[in-house]
Image (cartoon, helix red, strand yellow):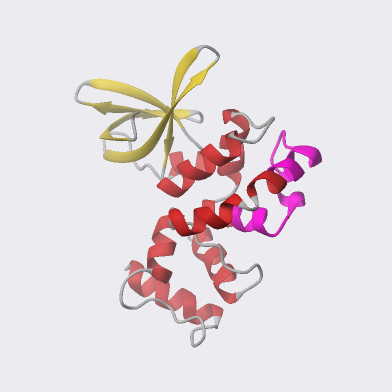
Amino acid sequence: MIASLTGILEHKDGAGAVINVGGVGYLCLMSTSSLLGLGLVGSVVRVETLLLMKNDALALYGFASVEERTLFESLTSVSGVGAKFALAILSAYAPSELTMIIQTSDATRLCAVSGIGKKTAQRIILELQGSLVALGNGTGVHTPEAGSAEAEAILALEAMGFSASEIALALHGGDDEVDQGEESNISDLIRLALKKLG
């Protein structure tokens, strides 16, 4: 399996990106958010990848983080949710936000994604709610309590353009990890995260 690619970004559009690795151009289908975070054409980029069979042909999918790839795999394991819908959901919500939506059974927000109806949204929640608890322990997807100061700080940092992995590292990585008992103020969490993010 092709787990990741590091190479020169040759082209990107609304559907995906072409990454040149050693003279070979790999077309990676990606979410809108991951595409926006790739940078400029001509720059060196790295993406996590997953190779899948699509309509009797191989398709390579690219992701900004391991967390996003894991969620993509989880979403496509749900009956009725193919790769196209999984990318649409990941284009609408960052991994941490999507995990929170599923954990809090917020079907309304899932239905806001084009093509996702109420029944599909409920199926996603039903089938993934339990497994995402394990994901949080195994892949670095951290799920704060909905409505908490940390959850609000994450949403604010995502709006500033930081990735889920950057935010997780800022709030939970290293010796300066936030003590939620002491740093319960949203502005304090954001200030500390921005300090660590440089």
Report which quarter residue 120 is drawn in.
top right
Q: Which of 162 and 100 lies nearest the eye of the viewer?
A: 100
**Residue name at image x 51 percent, y 59 percent:** 158
Q: Is 72 rendered above or below residue 29? A: below
Q: How many marks?
A: 0
Q: In which quarter of the image is the C terminus?
A: bottom left
What secondary structure characterizes most of the magenta part?
helix
Q: Is residue 13 magenta?
A: no
Q: Where does the image place residue 180, in percent across and percent down from the top left?
A: 50, 80
Q: Does the magenta stretch include residue 104?
A: yes
Q: Where does the image place residue 59, in percent across and percent down from the top left?
A: 45, 21
Q: Is residue 147 left or right of residue 17?
A: right
Q: Which of 18 and 82 lies nearest the eye of the viewer?
A: 82
Magenta-colored span: 98-124
Q: In this view, does 62 lie to the left or right of 184?
A: left
**Residue name at image x 70 percent, y 48 percent:** 125
Judge whether residue 161 can be spotted in this image: no
Q: Which of 124 and 164 lies nearest the eye of the viewer?
A: 124
